[in-house]
Amino acid sequence: MKKLLLIVLITFLPLSSNAESNLDKILSAGVLKVGTTGDWDPMTMKDPATNKYKGFDIDVMNELAKDMGVKVEFVPAEWKTIVSGITSARYDISTSVTKTPKRAEVAGFTDTYYKYGTVPLVLKKNLKKFSTWDSLNSSNVTIATTLGTSQEEKAKEFFPKSKLNSIEAPARDFQEVLAGRADGNITSSTEANKLVIKYPQLAIVPDGEKNPAFLAMMVPKGDDKWNNYINGWIKKKKSSGFFTKLLDKYNLKSL
Ligand code: KH2
């Protein structure tokens, strides 16, 4: 019996105590791998001409890598698999995503540095018919969402009576509204404000923002050493004014 216990201890103890933190792995490899979708203005945008990423989160990651003294490598990710990229260690960290309970079941979240509200978008010519959130919750209404996003989850809560049409990135929910295949979609107020300028046919339902949501980066769940390191870095960068400056650069409101 004692022998069995010893074998069990020898087999399992070193595993748990030696489990390498991402922090050590990144520092010894000299590379920080960052999962990002490249389709979220102004957070992460891939320039098709150069294949380079730019945006608020890209600046954050470049700064983090610089401060860690390592190179940054952006790993292409998709919304529907962005969480599995963390759980299967395809990258060490993701650019920011909305903190949701579902994601938090399997992934770790860093501290947050940006909050946004959600608004519905409809065609301007339908604004009379759809002037409130409630008017979009009906069995005659189709709401477009993007597969794997927090908006897809929230749309089910906000519009239980409506038909939900979930489409896959790089196609976008608002394009369904523009094409008349859906009556509305929901997105961050930040994106909505930009979209109504780019597409004057679109309008924001003037019924106010809902669902205050927080953005944070995802890291592997349980890697406290790595998670705490990032949180310490965020804290330091907040007090040095780095985040305020960057939010300003991209016209984002601070927390
Ligand atoms: S979330 C990000 O973390 N968005 O909230 C969603 O799921 C981002 C709206 C579709 C562009 C493609 C950006 C999803």
Image (tube, rainbow, N blue to C red):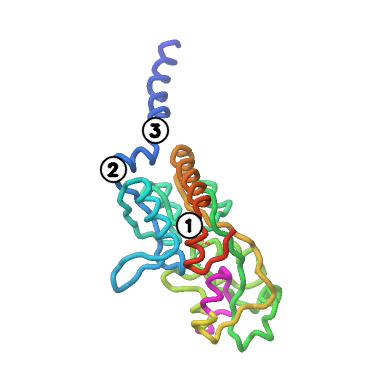
Q: Is residue 61 left or right of residue 144?
A: left
Residue type at mark 1 is Ser
- Quadrant showing the N terminus: top left
Residue 81 location in percent, x, y? Answer: 43, 57
Q: Badge 1: few (under 14), some or many (20 or more) residues near its Cα, within 10 Å?
A: many
Residue extending farthest front: 240
Q: Quadrant of residue 156?
A: bottom right
Residue type at mark 3 is Ala
Residue type at mark 2 is Ala
Q: CA distance from mark 2 to mark 3?
A: 16 Å
- What secondary structure is found at the residue carrying circle 1? loop
User: In front: mark 2 or mark 3?
Assistant: 2
Residue 164 belongs to the span the image colors magenta = no
Residue 194 belongs to the span the image colors magenta = yes
Q: Nearer the viewer, residue 79 or 162?
A: 79
- What secondary structure is found at the residue carrying circle 3? loop
- What secondary structure is found at the residue carrying circle 2? helix
Residue 157 location in percent, x, y? Answer: 65, 63
Mark 1 in CB contact with mark 3 (< 8 angstroms): no
Q: Which residue is mark 3?
A: 19
Highlighted range, magenta: 179-195
Mark seen at residue 29: 2
> Quick check: is the Cβ at mark 1 less than 8 Å away from ligand 1?
yes
Residue at position x 39%, y 17% from top?
A: 7
Q: Which residue is mark 1?
A: 96
Q: Is residue 71 above or below residue 117?
A: above
Earlier residue among tags 1 and 3: 3
